[in-house]
Amino acid sequence: METINIDILFKIAGIGIFISVLNIVLKQADKEEQAQMLTLVGVVIVLLMVIQLISQLFNSIRTIFNIY
C-alpha cells in the first residue's frame, strides 16, 4: 500500500501561488480575459490532480475490503 506524500499538497499550493501571481500581472497589464482563462486552466489542472487522488482512494478501499 502506498503512503500518502505531502508532495501533492505542495504541488497544489505551488500551482495556486503561481497562478495567482500571473493573474495579478495580467490584470495590471489590462489583460482581463487572459487572466480569467489562466485561472480557469489552473482550476482544471488542480481538479484533475484531485480526481486522480480520489481514484487512488477508491482503489485502495476496493483492495482493503476485497470488493470486485
Image (tube, rainbow, N blue to C red):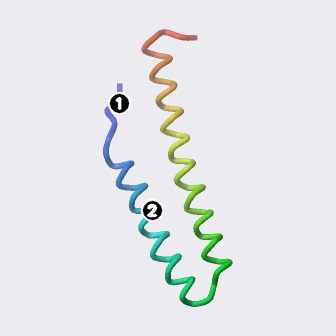
- Identify the residue position indicated by label 1 in the image: 2
- What is the secondary structure assignment of the residue under circle 2? helix
Query: Looking at the image, is mark 2 or mark 1 nearer the viewer?
Result: 2
User: Alpha-carbon distance for marks 2 and 1?
Assistant: 24 Å
Residue 50, position as x, y percentages in the image? 51, 44
- The type of residue carrying mark 1 is Glu
Q: Dot 2, how many residues are within 10 Å of its Cα: few (below 14), some (14-19), or many (20+)?
A: some
Residue 6, position as x, y percentages in the image? 31, 45
Residue 20: give its label. none
Toward which corner of the image does residue 18 lie, by quadrant? Answer: bottom left
The residue at 48%/31% (across/down) is: 56
For residue 15, above or below residue 34:
above
- Identify the residue position indicated by label 2 in the image: 15
Mark 2 or mark 1, earlier in chain: 1
For residue 38, above or below residue 52:
below
- What is the secondary structure assignment of the residue under circle 1? loop
Q: Are marks 2 and 1 in contact (CB under 8 Å)?
A: no
The residue at 57%/48% (across/down) is: 48
The residue at 31%/32% (across/down) is: 3
Which quadrant, please, contains the N terminus?
top left
For residue 25, above or below residue 60:
below
Toward which corner of the image does residue 44 lie, by quadrant? Answer: bottom right
Residue 7, position as x, y percentages in the image? 33, 49
- The type of residue carrying mark 2 is Ile
